[in-house]
Image: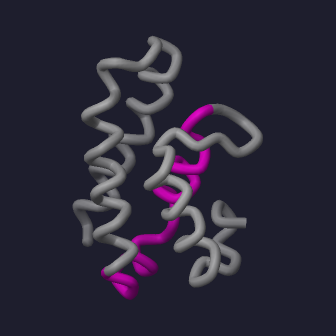
Amino acid sequence: MIGQGIGLAYLVPIALDRLEEQPLAEGDLYPGDLLTAVLTIDVAFWKNDRDSFERIRAIVSQVREMRPSLEEFDRNILKKSLEMATSRLAKI
């Protein structure tokens, strides 16, 4: 539902709680897919919810720090998500 932009005011805080506990939380697809879904949220959401914006920035920083210690497959998946995060979050 997050990827479809449905119920973001309710779902994003729950997703951020989960990501703060486990940044590579997995939904149905692959490790880190929850993070990827959250990072695809429209920039307008982050502009209107500064607390959530600060939380996702901290999570992205944490993932960047842990990336070198991950297996190659996970590193490659995260590389795309982190590149997306850099470009999208910079617009806020």
Say above or below: 89 vs 13: above
Tell me, what colour scheme is on the image? one colour
Point out the image quarter for the C terminus: bottom left
Q: Residue 48 location in percent, x, y?
A: 38, 87
Q: Which residue of the protein is positioned furthest toward the top in this rendering?
A: 72
Residue at left 55%, top 56%? 18
Numbered range of the magenta stretch: 31-50
The quarter of the picture where residue 5 lies is bottom right
Residue at left 35%, top 39%? 63
Residue at left 53%, top 47%? 36
Let me know if residue 35 is in the magenta part: yes
Q: Residue 60 location in percent, x, y?
A: 33, 49
Chief secondary structure of the magenta portion: helix
Which of 76 and 52 lies nearest the eye of the viewer?
Answer: 52
Q: Which residue of the protein is positioned furthest toward the front in this rendering?
A: 21
Q: Residue 61 location in percent, x, y?
A: 26, 47
Point out the image quarter for the N terminus: bottom right
Tag count: 0
Q: Residue 8 location in percent, x, y?
A: 60, 77
Residue at left 68%, top 80%? 7
Which of 53 and 91 lies nearest the eye of the viewer?
Answer: 53
Say above or below: 11 vs 23: below
